[in-house]
């Protein structure tokens, strides 16, 4: 009997982030006291002025179909944001608004990658990168980075990975899952390598731009010598606590923007009209003057410091200092080969399942992000939850011998 479903479905993996979140929710419905540190979602509410803009849009009957690439005044607001925050010059024709940065990433990859094309992906990487590449029938080429070098790849590693089949390099700074933030000098050095290959493009995923603990965000697109090879992907989910609004956007050379518009027009068409009107208010507000955003970033930094301090007390958990996003990505390979008699820990997924089954703490295995020696903590939760979660973890791993 032939397979019922298309081959692409069988090739595609379920997002392990969403899988762990789902399993945690299932245990909660059974009455278990689950602490979820698995999902990457700010536990803050959308600022009131953004919600007010959405309410106003409803009253003004913004309830009809929208242009595929987004309202003109929203794309102008995106351009304004790029100039104000990043000193980047774009026109509305370079902007395409989508239902979240995930769709933006998929649009770009599907627009650029042919079957067999190579896409360079520094590891660790966000879980959906590899799967989006599979959908485009490209080949992911992973470049390893580990905790000793703060999970950052070098220009030489990029140089060594480029072949005549390379089409795209995917970068994410600040990075999910590692929290690593590339400096201006590091980005420029990598850009200088890529500039030697005018047919290679950088997809610069900057969704965590505003959750940065070390100063100004740096974008690949700031360097004029490579700007025409850069597609910036960003959105409102993380910095503006607008995950459910589903709005992301790209800034790209005109031809690529037109291609993304064409693909999106056949899949989803335009993003929600109400979300778009709310996004205009969000993007026109200077993030340095929005108290809600400043409070959120301050809280994330405090939680990061708390979590790092707590993890010091767990033998075998090796951490660095993440400088952005809201994740800690410790190396836990110390526990590989250990057992409590019932559970044998062979890899990061085994440890995550052990912690979920025994002490009801949901984490995500590093294998989902291309680094099987680590696990990801999301500290987008309360300090009390972090304290209790680490207390449970410390007790659980003490039984592993």
Image (cartoon, grey):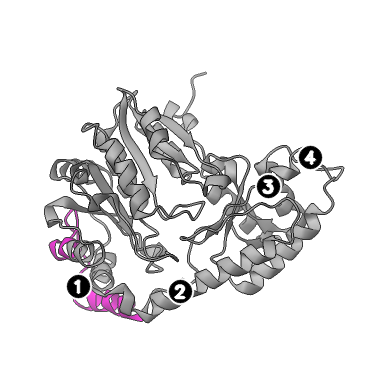
Which residues, given as a range, are shown in magenta?
A: 48-76
The residue furthest right is: 341
- Residue denoted by label 2: 296
Marks 4/2: CA distance? 39 Å
* Mark seen at residue 61: 1
Asked whether 185 or 248 is in front, the reply is: 185
Q: What is the distance, in whole Å, between disc 3 and disc 2 at their CAs?
A: 29 Å
In this rendering, position of residue 320 left or right of residue 173 = right
Q: Which mark is residue 332?
A: 3
Quick one: label 4 or label 1, which is nearer the N terminus? Answer: 1
Front: mark 4 or 3: 3
- Name the image quarter holding residue 341: top right
Tag count: 4
Disc marking residue 165: none
Query: For the residues carrying marks 4 and 2, which lies nearer the camera in this image?
Result: 2
Per the image, label 2 sits on a secondary structure element best described as helix
N-terminal-most mark, 4 or 2: 2
| Disc 1 residue crowd, few under 14, some 14–19, many 20+, Cα 10 Å | few
| Residue pointed to by mark 4 | 344
């Amino acid at each position: 009997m032939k397979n019922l479903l298309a081959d692409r479905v069988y090739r595609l993996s379920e997002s392990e982030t969403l899988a762990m979140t789902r399993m945690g929710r299932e245990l909660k419905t059974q009455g278990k006291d689950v602490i979820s540190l698995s999902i990457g979602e700010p536990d803050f509410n959308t600022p009131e002025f953004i919600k007010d803009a959405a309410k106003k849009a409803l009253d003004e009957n913004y309830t009809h179909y929208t242009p595929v690439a987004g309202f003109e005044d929203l794309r102008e607001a995106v351009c304004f944001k790029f100039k104000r925050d990043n000193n980047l010059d774009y026109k509305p024709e370079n902007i395409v608004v989508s239902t979240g940065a995930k769709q933006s990433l998929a649009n770009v990859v599907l627009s650029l990658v042919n079957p067999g094309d190579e896409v360079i992906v520094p590891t660790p990487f966000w879980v959906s990168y590899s799967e989006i590449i599979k959908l485009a029938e490209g080949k992911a080429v992973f470049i390893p980075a580990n905790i000793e070098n703060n999970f950052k790849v070098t220009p030489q590693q990029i140089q060594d990975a480029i072949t005549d089949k390379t089409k795209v390099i995917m970068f994410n700074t600040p990075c999910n899952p590692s929290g690593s933030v590339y400096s201006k000098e590091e980005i420029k050095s990598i850009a200088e390598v890529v500039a030697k290959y005018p047919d290679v493009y950088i997809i610069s995923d900057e969704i965590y731009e505003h959750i940065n603990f070390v100063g100004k965000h740096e974008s690949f697109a700031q360097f004029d010598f490579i700007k025409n090879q850069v597609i910036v992907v960003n959105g409102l989910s993380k910095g503006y606590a607008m995950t459910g609004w589903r709005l992301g956007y790209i800034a790209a050379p005109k031809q690529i923007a037109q291609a993304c518009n064409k693909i999106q027009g056949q899949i989803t068409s335009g993003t929600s009209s109400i979300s778009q009107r709310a996004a205009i208010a969000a993007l026109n507000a200077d993030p340095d003057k929005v108290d809600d955003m400043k409070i959120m970033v301050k809280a994330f930094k405090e939680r990061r410091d708390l979590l790092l301090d707590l993890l010091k007390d767990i033998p075998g958990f090796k951490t660095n200092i993440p400088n952005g996003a809201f994740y800690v990505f410790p190396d836990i390979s110390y526990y590989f080969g250990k057992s409590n008699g019932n559970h044998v820990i062979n890899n990061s997924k085994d440890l995550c399942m052990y912690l979920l089954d025994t002490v009801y703490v949901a984490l995500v295995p590093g294998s989902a992000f291309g680094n099987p020696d680590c696990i990801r903590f999301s500290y987008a939760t309360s300090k009390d939850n972090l304290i209790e979660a680490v207390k449970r973890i410390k007790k659980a791993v003490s039984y592993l011998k």
